[in-house]
Image (tube, grey):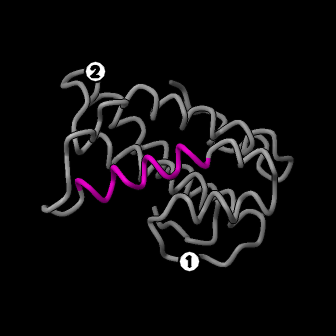
């Protein structure tokens, strides 16, 4: 299967996959640094898929705060996710390369996971995205 960075469904499929693996890892091993990275990557892909579906030109970034601000230009409900975006991005960078402070990474894993579930609501209610794979996310 070949994917396209201009197809929101491909972004959502890859986000769903990361979330599925994060959930399985959490069930078996609890909160892990890798699990936090998978959550960040899932949120990143959901946001990018949403934005691409709205005509946004892909920007290669891992900064969820930047992506949430861009999504807020399309739908004010994304403002509810500013704190999630900042927290998850900070935890992502702390564990991504050695040298970060890992003290709090994953400490609020269940809250981060629930936040990603709620992040999907504005995307699911977007008529341009209705019925897409993001609607199948479970938590």
Residue 127 percent location from the top left of the image:
86, 47
Name the quadrant of the N terminus. Answer: bottom left
Q: Which residue is mark 1?
A: 59
Disc 2 designates what residue? 27
SS state under label 2: helix
Closest to the observer, 22 or 76: 76
Chain part drawn in magenta: 82-95
Of the pair 112 and 134, the residue shown nearer to us: 112
Q: Secondary structure at mark 1?
A: loop
Left or right placement of residue 131 versus residue 39 in this view: right
Q: What residue is at 58 percent from the left and 66 percent from the top?
A: 66
* Residue 94 belongs to the span the image colors magenta: yes
User: Going by the image, does 60 lie left or right of 110?
Assistant: right
Q: Earlier in the sequence, mark 1 or mark 2?
A: 2
The residue located at (30%, 31%) in the rendering is 107
Residue 12 in the image, given as x and y percentages of width and height: 57, 50
Residue at the extreme right of the image, as rendered: 127
Q: Alpha-carbon distance for marks 1 and 2?
A: 33 Å
Q: Crowding near pointer 2: few (<14 within 10 Å), some, many (20+)?
A: few
Q: Can you tell which quarter of the image residue 104 is in? A: top left
Residue under the image location 54 percent in, 34 percent down: 115
Q: Residue 76: horizontal and vertical position, in percent? A: 81, 50
User: Is 135 located above or below residue 54 in the figure?
Assistant: above
Left or right: 116 in relation to 29: right
Q: In the rendering, at what x and y percent does residue 79 appear?
A: 71, 48
The answer to if 83 sits in the magenta stretch is yes
Magenta: main secondary structure equals helix
Report how many numbered discs are placed on residues in the image.
Answer: 2
Asked if marks 1 and 2 touch (Cβ < 8 Å), the reply is no
């Amino acid at each position: 299967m070949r994917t396209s960075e201009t197809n929101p469904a491909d972004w959502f499929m890859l986000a769903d996959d990361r979330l599925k693996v994060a959930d399985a890892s959490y069930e078996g091993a609890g909160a892990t640094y890798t699990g936090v990275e998978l959550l960040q990557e899932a949120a990143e892909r959901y946001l990018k898929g949403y934005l691409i579906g709205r005509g946004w030109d892909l920007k290669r970034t891992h900064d969820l705060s930047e992506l949430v601000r861009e999504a807020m230009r399309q739908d004010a409900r994304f403002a509810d996710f500013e704190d999630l975006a900042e927290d998850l991005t900070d935890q992502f960078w702390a564990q991504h390369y050695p040298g970060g402070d890992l003290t709090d990474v994953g400490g609020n894993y269940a809250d981060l996971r629930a936040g990603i579930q709620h992040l999907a609501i504005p995307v699911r209610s977007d008529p341009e995205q209705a019925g897409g794979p993001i609607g199948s996310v479970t938590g």
